[in-house]
Image (cartoon, rainbow, N blue to C red):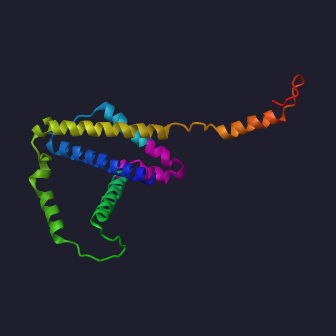
């Protein structure tokens, strides 16, 4: 079961990072965006599943779950931790809980500010629109659509009312107990 859980986590990482890559490429290459009713409904299913699963925790939990972006950010952080742990396992690095204070790197902040002020973000188009017509982009889009529909199926299972569990052992034991209590048959003298 543990290996299945790890495989599921790995699949989730690949699926989520594929979605983020498709989203980023689309935003950077598209000259315009259109709404798709089908995908808006799929998004609403995800939203409903998030709200239903936290409903019992109260209005604060519902308020936190409503903007799915917060949960997606947290999921991205967890997946980063998962990938980091796999890297550490692969390199044989010893896991440690030491805290080492580090200074904020000025270069990272400077690059972020420089990119923010550039024309790249003003127009929102970095990649040529022809990227959206390539075979690899189409394959990525199909892969993300497949994963999204698979996760919608899981969400719908979560939203479905719980099925009554069949207690076959208890039922068989009750039947056997009832049969033992039956009186002997007058014709054969044998208890059924």
Residue 60: % across, % down: 48, 54
Corner quadrant of residue 104: bottom left
- The residue that appears at 22% across and 43% down in the rendered structure is 22
Residue 134: % across, % down: 13, 36
- Which quadrant holds the C terminus? top right
Residue 171: % across, % down: 70, 36
Q: Which residues are magenta?
A: 49-69
Q: Is residue 66 magenta?
A: yes
Residue 16: % across, % down: 30, 48
- The residue that appears at 33% across and 71% down in the rendered structure is 94
Q: Main secondary structure of the magenta part?
A: helix
Corner quadrant of residue 155: top left
Q: Quick check: 2 above or below 36?
A: below
**Is 124 displayed left or right of 19 in the figure?**
left
Corner quadrant of residue 32: top left
**Is 60 displayed left or right of 182 in the figure?**
left
Q: Quick check: 186 above or below 7?
A: above
Of 63 and 23, the residue lying toward us: 23
Q: Is residue 189 magenta?
A: no
- The residue that appears at 84% across and 35% down in the rendered structure is 181
């Amino acid at each position: 079961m543990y290996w299945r859980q790890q495989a599921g986590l790995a699949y989730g990482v690949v699926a989520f990072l594929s979605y983020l890559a498709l989203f980023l490429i689309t935003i950077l290459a598209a000259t315009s965006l259109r709404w798709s009713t089908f995908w808006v409904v799929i998004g609403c299913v995800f939203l409903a599943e998030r709200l239903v699963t936290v409903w019992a925790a109260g209005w604060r939990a519902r308020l936190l779950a409503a903007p799915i972006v917060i949960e997606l950010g947290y999921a991205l952080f967890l997946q980063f931790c998962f990938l980091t742990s796999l890297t550490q396992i692969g390199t044989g690095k010893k896991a440690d809980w030491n805290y080492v204070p580090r200074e904020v790197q000025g270069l990272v902040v400077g690059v972020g500010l420089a990119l923010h002020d550039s024309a790249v973000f003003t127009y929102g188009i970095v990649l040529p629109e022809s990227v959206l017509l390539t075979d690899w982009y189409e394959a990525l889009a199909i892969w993300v659509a497949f994963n999204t529909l698979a996760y919608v199926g899981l969400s719908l299972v979560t939203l479905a009312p719980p099925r009554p569990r069949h207690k076959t052992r208890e039922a068989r034991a009750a039947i056997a107990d009832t049969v033992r209590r039956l009186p002997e048959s007058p014709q054969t003298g044998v208890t059924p």
